[in-house]
Image (cartoon, rainbow, N blue to C red):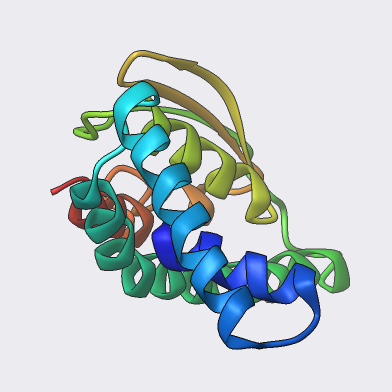
């Protein structure tokens, strides 16, 4: 966070001189100390965030891939009039520990075409699936696996 304060100071000043950098270092140190003292901030939280960045990028890539695959499947249902979809309401329990991870999982399921998270209470998920094929693998999805790694 100290580096972010310093970079913002330099960007807002519009040029780099020795005087600007020294004043920026001083102000960044004061702001960083304030954040640590009064906002319960620590360097370990920065390190934790940096550790999660590769996993978050991987999660977004997997989400985009799953959205594309589901779009293809929904398009198949639309273009094949003889195919009879079999909607299902699926209930499963997640092993995710934090509420944030469960909400991210629920939103990822809803973002994927053909599935909608109807209800989330604690670890209990209720998901409406356009077809029974979408219900397969919901309980142990790749989303949940990646979120567990991010929680650890």
**The one of 82 and 121 positioned closer to us in this rendering:** 121
Which residue is found at the position 77% from the left and 68% from the top?
12
**Residue 71: x %, y % from top left:** 72, 69
- Above or below: residue 97 compared with residue 25: above
The answer to which quarter of the image holds residue 82 is: bottom right
**Residue 40: x %, y % from top left:** 31, 27
The answer to which quarter of the image holds residue 98 is: top left
Q: Is residue 23 left or right of residue 38?
A: right
**Residue 22: x %, y % from top left:** 50, 72
- Above or below: residue 85 compared with residue 66: above
- Above or below: residue 71 compared with residue 113: below
- Above or below: residue 27 compared with residue 78: above
The answer to which quarter of the image holds residue 24 is: bottom right
**The one of 106 and 45 positioned closer to us in this rendering:** 45
Count the marks. Answer: 0
Which residue is found at the position 37% from the left and 68% from the top?
53
Which residue is at the far left?
Answer: 152
Q: Is residue 117 left or right of residue 56?
A: right
**Residue 100: x %, y % from top left:** 41, 32
Work out which quarter of the rendered image holds the N terminus and state it: bottom left
Which residue is at the far top?
Answer: 121
Q: Is residue 14 left or right of residue 38?
A: right
Which residue is found at the position 43% from the left and 45% from the top?
30
Which residue is found at the position 63% from the left and 38% from the top?
87
Q: Is residue 24 left or right of residue 98?
A: right
**The one of 3 and 71 positioned closer to us in this rendering:** 3
Which residue is at the far front?
Answer: 19
């Amino acid at each position: 966070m100290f580096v972010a304060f310093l970079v913002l100071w330099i960007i807002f000043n519009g040029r780099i001189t020795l005087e600007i950098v020294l004043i920026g270092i001083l102000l960044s140190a004061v702001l960083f100390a304030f954040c640590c003292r009064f906002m319960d901030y620590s360097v370990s939280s920065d390190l934790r965030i940096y550790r999660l960045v590769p996993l978050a990028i991987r999660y977004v890539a997997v989400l985009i891939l799953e959205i594309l695959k589901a779009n293809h499947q929904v398009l198949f249902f639309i273009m094949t009039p003889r195919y009879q979809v079999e909607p299902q309401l699926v209930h499963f329990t997640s092993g995710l520990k934090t509420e944030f991870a469960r909400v991210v999982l629920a939103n990822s399921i809803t973002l994927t075409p053909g599935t909608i998270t109807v209800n989330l209470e604690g670890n209990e998920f209720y998901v409406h699936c356009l077809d029974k094929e979408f219900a397969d693998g919901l309980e142990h999805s790749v989303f949940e696996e990646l979120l567990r790694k991010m929680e650890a």
